[in-house]
Amino acid sequence: MIVTGREPAHGNGAAWNVTDHERDHRRDYRRRLRRSDAMVAGLWASAAAALALFLAYGGAGQFGTVSDAVTSLGVIAGLVGTDFVLVMIVLAARIPLIDRTVGHDRAIAVHRSLGKPALFLLLAHAILLIVGYGMASGSNPIAEFGPMLAIPDLPLAFVGLGLLIVVVITSLVAVRRKFSYEGWHLVHLLSYVAVLVAVPHQLSVGGIFAGGSLERAYWLALYIVAFGAIATFRVAEPLVSSVRHRLRVGAVTQIAPGVVSIEMTGRRLRRLHYAGGQFFIWRFWTGRTWWHSHPISLSSVPSDRTARITVRNLGTGSNAISRVPVGTRVWFEGPYGIFTDAGRTAPKLAIAVAGIGITPVRAFLEDSDIRPGEATILLRASTPEETYLWDEVIELARHKGATVYTMVGRRSTGPRGWMPANDDRRGVTLSSIFPDLTESDLYICGPTAWLDLVEAEALADGIPPHQLHTERFDW
Amino acid sequence: MSVRATLGGIFASAAILGIGWQFGSAAAHTFATQASTPPSTTTGSTGTDSPTASAAPAPSSSPPVSASAGSASGTFIGAVESTRYGDVQVEITVANGKITDVTALHLTDRDGRSVQISNRAAPTLRSEVISSQSARVDSVSGATYTSDGYVSSVQSAIDRAGL
């Protein structure tokens, strides 16, 4: 274990008790919290609005008979389920306001958590309506299937439901692992088709969205917002940005076995408004790599003409991009993420990184205006060969007055599996490395299994969850 | 999820549901009054006794035919009945004072589901009217609006035929 930088300034904490710096963190945090609360409330309100559409149509009076009640429940399930699907599309659109407020990974976590409820609601919609219609006409649900398919636009709706089932099943964690990211993503794009082919039956089969009604206008506006957000932020904006900044590979340097730094050159890169720690989704235009896209953080703050990423061979995709020739055209989406100074909430800063997880932290440290003694950094590697960028981080830490601890060695089989065995035996804990842990923002970046262990110990030591900032290497 | 987000979500949702509920009861009220709209201007009349082809299935078409009082013969068009799922209008065919056929000129059709329901209910209502020779027939379950409109229109047609 080595320690560099100045001594932590425990003695004169009173002088820094409340600085402008801390006040800014708190004010920004409160502002973000207000925005994220409003978004959560908006999510529930949109589901309520779907239900209100049914009530406004006089739905409250349509529970008189069993078949009416079943049919009404089916309609409600369809309305709320569709609302969830549209909210999911909005969450996946990488809208800058949402990314700045809760971060892309939390938006996607909510997106995922809505997937199964949305599918169950839409399945319930189909089943309840088949049963409800069947009860009304005195036929069993299977016999009712034929007459239902005779209703205009309903066959298309069944196609949409089928596609949605495929999309959700391929996104279940266990199933998704069997796909490449690209294969899974291709299937996932079907969800747009599924959502769109369901529109005609919503407008024509029930009377809620009658032509010219306010309800119809509201419902179509939801679709326009969701698909407009995708078209703007997932298609148009990345295309324009990629064309405008004209990034090309300038140099590929091997910095350790299996690890390369890729320098890219472009123009007007300051206009990207990049904050240290953010990531981009890269696409390298060579014959072997153009269909892969890679979420990778910059490993230093870009100049106006150059940007650098550092990549380790984690999969076949990143193996291929470590061999891209100089001059390759590069497209990108981003920058994304709040693994940055903007995520700060607490007076102190604690950083724990392992392996290639050092890259966003390297850029974050360069970009952040920490005071001497504010930050403590833990660097973790399994072998001395995996200490890439450590020299740069230690140099930055020395310059900014941050404390650095390092841990090298195979993982402990003891209670603290995230650290080497000899450190574990000596009784090192997360709190002994970061004595002000509960007063700190803890930024963790590294392999998921390692990160989970550090996160669990931090929470057990009493750090408030909003002070945890994590960047996991998975999708 | 913070308390503020939870409370905000609950209150916003409650407000939106309240507005929806309010619109819903207003709508139910409107439809209740519409259902009692008086019959249209088409009236049956006495005159020639040759029952010709039935009228075109348009609500405003007037009957080309009629019958004499008592043992009426011919076709008689009923009033247009408005329901929340669309208009209902029927035409009855009468031979020697007996209803021999009921033709639906217009059935509830505001949306795909209404079309399905009215197409299912119409044959049942037709045969019940013919067998009972009156408009006093039971509603078809699951097709209340269509049934109500149908029997009202049948009744007005019977009135015009003077049966």
Image (cartoon, rainbow, N blue to C red):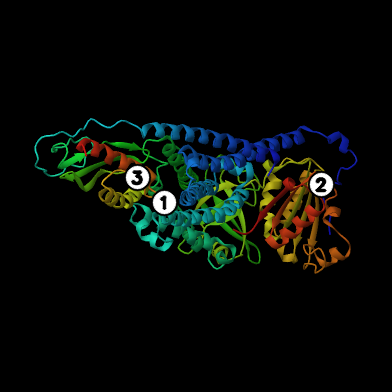
* Residue A384, percent from left and from top: 75, 65
Q: Dot 2, how many residues are within 10 Å of its Cα: few (below 14), some (14-19), or many (20+)?
A: many
Can residue A54 be seen by looking at this rendering? no
**In the picture, residue A420 is in which quadrant?**
bottom right
Q: Above or below — where is A201 with respect to A454? A: above
* Mark carried by residue A381: none
* Residue B129, percent from left and from top: 28, 48
Q: Give the number of callouts.
A: 3
Mark 1 sits on what residue? A198
Can residue A310 be seen by looking at this rendering? yes
Instruction: Kindly indicate whether the residues beneath marks 2 and 3 are on one polypeptide chain.
Output: no
Which amino acid is tagged 1?
A: Ala
> Which is closer to the viewer, label 2 or label 1?
1
**Residue nearer the viewer, A141 or A448:** A141
Mark 3 sits on what residue? B147
Q: Which label's residue is closer to the chain start, 2 or 1?
A: 1
* Side of A251 where A344 appears, left or right: right
Q: Element at badge 3?
A: helix
Which amino acid is tagged 3?
A: Ser
> Which is closer to the viewer, label 2 or label 3?
3
* Residue A135, percent from left and from top: 43, 55
Q: Dot 3, how many residues are within 10 Å of its Cα: few (below 14), some (14-19), or many (20+)?
A: many
Image point 51% across, 42% down: which residue?
A: A50
* Mark carried by residue A438: 2
The chain that hosts pointer 2 is A
* Side of A32 where A402 appears, left or right: right
The answer for how far apart the CA atoms under marks 2 and 3 are is 71 Å
The N terminus of chain A - image quarter: bottom right
* Residue B103, percent from left and from top: 23, 46
Image point 55% across, 41% down: which residue?
A: A48
The chain that hosts pointer 3 is B
